[in-house]
Image (cartoon, grey):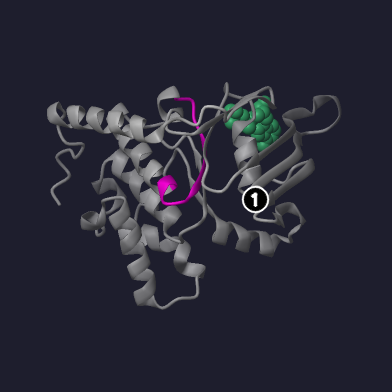
């Protein structure tokens, strides 16, 4: 049985003649461990779809089942628990709290988790280590670069080790090299078993996914899972490219990055 099942999902905003059909009768299945890119024009319904998958936006009709749980049949509180346990979110704007340090930002989602202070700190430090930012854990968000902010946001989204990561334009505000680093990071999480669903406009980012779902006018136009690429071959090429790039580019860290 598939891990995520969407059955005739639909979302309308407004009512009567003025109603907008943002997501129109979509059905698809996602297996555990897949890395999916959702692509489409602005206004096509991508964010609405991702919001529904994120248990944040109830469909007007249809069903969404994750790990055998019919998400929208759950009550508010149970759904919030589901979100906390199952899902990590990455958004284009990082939503870091400016007066909290990097470490404190990553600790935030653990506020509601039942665990001792030490354990929580270890979890947050582990997440920061995974994104390569442990050394900068005491900095404030305005003391790190855009790419590093995104990495903090990613550390925060995985601190709870969710099985599913939902990302909405995770590299939308980043330069090419930093975007590539972020995508490499997501790819690593995916290789470690995380299911990833990412909305992106960027064909470069979509190349990291195994499957591309194209959305047009609220409909699933194309679902390309036939070409599961030879990842090893592709990864070798990427490594070569990354090595070449790192030779002639100044480090991502600007003058602020001393630690
Ligand atoms: P995308 O993420 O592909 O840009 P969205 O899912 O944001 O598309 O939007 C799909 C359609 O639904 C658009 O026509 C948009 O204007 C409309 N829409 C999105 N959110 C709302 C909302 N909260 N209220 C009314 N209309 C909305």
Instruction: Compare residues 117 and 193 and report the one nearer the observer.
Output: 193
Against 108, is 152 above or below?
above
> In the image, residue 49 lies at what x, y percent?
64, 37
Q: Is residue 2 above or below residue 73?
A: above
Q: Residues within 10 Å of mark 1 (few under 14, many from 20)?
A: many
The reply, left or right, for residue 257 in relation to residue 113 is: left
Give the image location of residue 27, x and y in percent: 72, 36
Provide residue 43's location: percent of width, then percent of height.
62, 25
Tell me if 111 is positioned left or right of 255 in this view: right
Q: Residue at x 47, y 34 (%)?
A: 209
* Residue 95 in view, yes or no: no
The question of residue 193 being in magenta is answered with yes
Answer left or right for 53 relative to 187.
right
Q: Position of residue 226 (x, y in %)?
A: 57, 28
In the figure, 29 relative to 25: above or below?
below
Residue farthest to the right?
A: 16
What residue is shown at x 47% (from left), y 42% (from top)? 91
- Return the residue at label 1: 55
Q: In the image, is the residue at mark 1 within 8 Å of ligand 1 by its beta carbon?
A: no
Q: Ligand 1 sits in which quadrant?
A: top right
SS state under label 1: loop
Q: Residue at x 17, y 44 (%)?
A: 256
Q: Residue at x 49, y 41 (%)?
A: 167
Q: From which residue to which does the magenta span run?
A: 190-202
């Amino acid at each position: 049985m598939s891990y995520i099942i969407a059955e005739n999902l639909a979302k309308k905003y407004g009512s009567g003649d003025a109603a907008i059909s943002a997501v129109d009768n979509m059905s698809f299945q996602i297996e555990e461990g897949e890395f999916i890119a959702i692509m489409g024009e602005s206004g096509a319904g991508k964010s609405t779809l991702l919001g529904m998958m994120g248990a944040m936006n109830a469909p007007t009709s249809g069903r969404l089942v994750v790990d055998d749980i019919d998400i929208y049949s759950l009550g508010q509180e149970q759904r919030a628990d589901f979100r906390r346990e199952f899902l990590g979110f990455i958004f284009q704007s990082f939503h870091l709290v400016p007066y909290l340090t990097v470490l404190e930002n990553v600790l935030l989602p653990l506020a509601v988790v039942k665990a001792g202070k030490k354990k929580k700190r270890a979890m947050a430090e582990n997440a920061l280590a995974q994104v390569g930012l442990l050394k900068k854990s005491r900095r404030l968000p305005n003391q790190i670069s855009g790419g590093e902010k995104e990495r903090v946001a990613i550390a925060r989204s995985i601190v709870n080790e969710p099985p599913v990561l939902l990302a909405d334009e995770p590299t939308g505000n980043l330069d090419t090299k930093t975007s590539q680093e972020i995508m490499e990071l997501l790819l690593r999480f995916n290789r470690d078993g995380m299911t990833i669903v990412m909305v992106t406009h960027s064909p470069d980012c979509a190349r990291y996914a195994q499957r591309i779902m194209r959305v047009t006018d609220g409909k699933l136009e194309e679902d390309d899972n036939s070409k599961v690429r030879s990842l090893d071959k592709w990864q070798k090429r990427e490594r070569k490219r990354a090595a070449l790039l790192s030779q002639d580019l100044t480090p991502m860290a600007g003058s602020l990055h001393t630690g």
